[in-house]
Image (cartoon, rainbow, N blue to C red):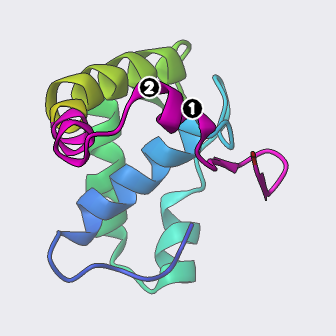
């Protein structure tokens, strides 16, 4: 996790978002343990209650479960649930803006498909 915090959003929310990103990116898989509250608090110099609040949001969303005395673990199907929600959010919120920009710039499908797109797996650009 990146130790830089955005001053415009509560740290507990940013922490929650970073764990969500780790699940979406496959860094944390179903059944994996989250880093302990104490470790995260110590590593990032946060109040343990702040970390706990961020983790509790994940529990409330059904993405993570608490196992008494053992820690917190990613629930089965958490990534699938997140992908579904992220896709819906993209289609509802972001895609209309992207589509409007494409239309405004007069871009067509062929031109978009020919454009250089970073390939995250290879670290190179496609031609």
Q: Residues within 10 Å of mark 2 (few under 14, many from 20)?
A: few
As helix, strand or loop, the secondary structure at mark 1 comes to: helix
The foreground one among 68 and 61 is 61
Residue 14 covered by magenta stretch: no
Mark number for residue 32?
none
Please tell me whether residue 121 belongs to the stretch shown in magenta: yes
Q: Position of residue 99 (x, y in %)?
A: 23, 33
Horizontal side of residue 87 vs 60, given as left or right: right
Do residues under tags 1 and 2 come within 8 Å of each other at their CB atoms? yes
**Res 72 visible:** no
Circle 2: element type: helix
Between the C-alphas of marks 1 and 2, the distance is 6 Å
Q: Residue at point 52% right, 13% down?
A: 77
Quadrant containing the N terminus is bottom right
Q: Residue at x 33, y 56 (%)?
A: 52
* Residue located 34% across and 28% down the image: 86
* Residue at left offset 50%, top offset 80%: 3
Q: Position of residue 70 (x, y in %)?
A: 60, 38
Please state the horizontal and vertical placement of residue 32, each as a whole percent of the image: 67, 33
Classify 88 as above or below 26: above
Q: Which mark is residue 113?
A: 1
Side of 71 where 103 appears, left or right = left
Q: Nearer the viewer, residue 127 or 22?
A: 127
Q: Which mark is residue 109?
A: 2
- Residue 62 image position (x, y, % from top left): 34, 22
**Magenta residue span:** 97-125
Q: How many marks?
A: 2
Compared with residue 27, is residue 4 higher up or lower down, i.e. above or below? below
Q: Is residue 49 left or right of residue 32?
A: left
- The picture quadrant where one finds residue 50 is bottom left
Q: Which of the 4 image quadrants contains residue 10?
A: bottom left
Seen in the picture, residue 94 relative to 13 is either above or below; the reply is: above
């Amino acid at each position: 996790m990146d130790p830089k915090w955005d001053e415009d959003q509560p740290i507990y929310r940013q922490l929650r978002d970073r764990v969500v990103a780790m699940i979406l990116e496959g860094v944390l898989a179903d059944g994996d343990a989250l880093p302990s509250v104490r470790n995260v608090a110590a590593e990032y110099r946060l109040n343990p209650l702040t970390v706990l609040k961020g983790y509790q949001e994940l529990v409330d969303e059904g993405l993570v479960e608490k196992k008494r005395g053992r820690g917190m673990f990613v629930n089965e199907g958490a990534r699938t649930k997140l992908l579904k929600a992220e896709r819906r959010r993209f289609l509802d919120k972001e895609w209309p803006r992207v589509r409007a920009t494409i239309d405004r710039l007069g871009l067509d499908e062929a031109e978009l498909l020919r454009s250089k797109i970073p390939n995250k797996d290879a670290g190179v650009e496609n031609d």
